[in-house]
Image (tube, rainbow, N blue to C red):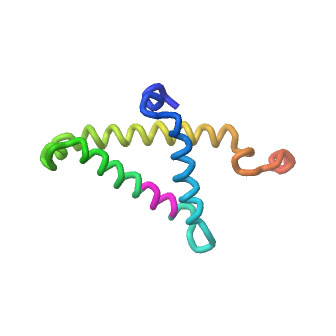
Amino acid sequence: MSETQQNQTDDKFFERADAHIALANGHVNAQVHPGLASNSLMYAASRFNAWVTAAGFKSGEDMKKEKKEVLDFFTEQYRLMLEENFDNYAEHYDHFMGVSKEMSEEA
């Protein structure tokens, strides 16, 4: 996690993140592909972030003036977090995806 991200977290950061992941996982089943749950989770995060942002302004007009900066901020934060998690999954793929050592040697 980058220094900027660490400055925006507290000791419950990962606990909350894990709770959201567990909620999304709970929606995945034979009829609901993980990608559908992911889309819902991203939509929920964007809607919540719009609300968090709106709470920091006095009017919708003030909010509109800062749209580019707000979108750039949240987009960059998501990119950094996704890049960190992507790299972690790629580095530890067998562990995260339940691939045994024997299976990976056969491939």
Q: Residue furthest top?
A: 3
Left or right of 39? Residue 19 is right
Measuring 25% from the left and 46% from the top, which residue is drawn there? 55
Measuring 54% from the left and 59% from the top, which residue is drawn there? 24
Q: Residue furthest front?
A: 11
Where residue 37 appears, x then y in whole percent? 51, 62
Q: Which residues are magenta?
A: 37-42
Where residue 74 appears, x then y in whole percent? 36, 41
Assess whether residue 38 is covered by the magenta stretch.
yes
- Between 87 and 63, the residue placed more toward the observer is 63
Q: Residue furthest bottom?
A: 31
Where residue 66 appears, x then y in whole percent? 20, 40
User: Magenta residues: mostly which secondary structure?
Assistant: helix
Measuring 24% from the left and 41% from the top, which residue is drawn there? 56
Q: Is residue 7 above or below residue 106?
A: above
Measuring 28% from the left and 45% from the top, which residue is drawn there? 53
Q: Is residue 6 above or below residue 28?
A: above
- Between 85 and 23, the residue placed more toward the observer is 23
Where residue 43 appears, x then y in whole percent? 40, 57
